[in-house]
Amino acid sequence: MRLKVENCANKSLKKYIGEAMSFYSKELFHPNMHKNIHVTVRFCKLNYETYAEAFPTSYSKKPRNFVVKLRNDLKKPVLALAHEMIHVKQYAKGELCLYHTKWKNTRVSQNTPYKDLPWEKEAYRKDYQLYKKFKIFFNKKPKM
């Protein structure tokens, strides 16, 4: 996986984000796909309702290049990153289409409440487990 972190002045956070991204990618993708995923994580201002978002950089049935935006003031950016990486996985595997109209080739009504969207249900069901797994892995790693 190629990773780029933008607008992160805190060097230790930038390194931690890189560690988390690598871990999440290995957990979510087959090794062959893991090698071909490219993600730019960008810390930025987002509207007050949005904490983070992920999207492909071009339209393709199974894209490989993504941007993940994280709000500058997040208390747990690595947890938000876990959630957004699940969306990256959904896009990359063709489960979620770019315009959020189909989930696993089934049309989803635009009137569906946010909490009932199938891609959000999956992300919320798996994000904390993925995050906890990373924290355990990271804390067991020998420190240099």
Image: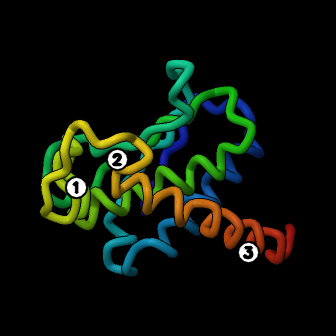
Q: CA distance from mark 2 to mark 3?
A: 25 Å
Q: CA distance from mark 3 to mark 1?
A: 28 Å
Identify the element where label 1 is drawn.
loop
Say which amino acid is labelled 1: Pro
Say which amino acid is labelled 3: Phe
Tell me which numbered mark, 3 or 1, is placed earlier along the sequence. Answer: 1
In the image, which disc is placed on residue 63? 1
Quarter of the figure with residue 104? bottom left
In the image, which disc is placed on residue 66? 2
**Residue 90, horizontal then vertical, whole percent:** 32, 61
Q: CA distance from mark 2 to mark 1?
A: 8 Å
| Outermost residue toward the bottom in this view | 31
Horizontal side, residue 115 vs residue 107: left or right: right
**Residue 128, horizontal then vertical, whole percent:** 64, 61
Quarter of the figure with residue 8? top right
Relative to the observer, which residue lies in front, 142 or 88? 88
Q: Give the class, few, some or many, for how many residues have Cα within 10 Å of label 1's Cα (few <14, many ≥20).
A: many
In the image, which disc is placed on residue 137? 3
Identify the element where label 2 is drawn.
strand
**For the point 36% across and 56% down, which residue is it?**
119
**Residue 137, horizontal then vertical, whole percent:** 73, 75
**Marks 2 & 1, CB-CB < 8 Å contact:** yes
**For the point 13% across and 63% down, which residue is it?**
105
**Residue 53, horizontal then vertical, whole percent:** 44, 38
Q: How is the image coloured?
A: rainbow
| Outermost residue toward the right in this view | 143
Horizontal side, residue 57 vs residue 124: left or right: left
Tell me which numbered mark, 2 or 3, is placed earlier along the sequence. Answer: 2
Say which amino acid is labelled 2: Phe
In the image, is residue 71 above or below residue 140? above
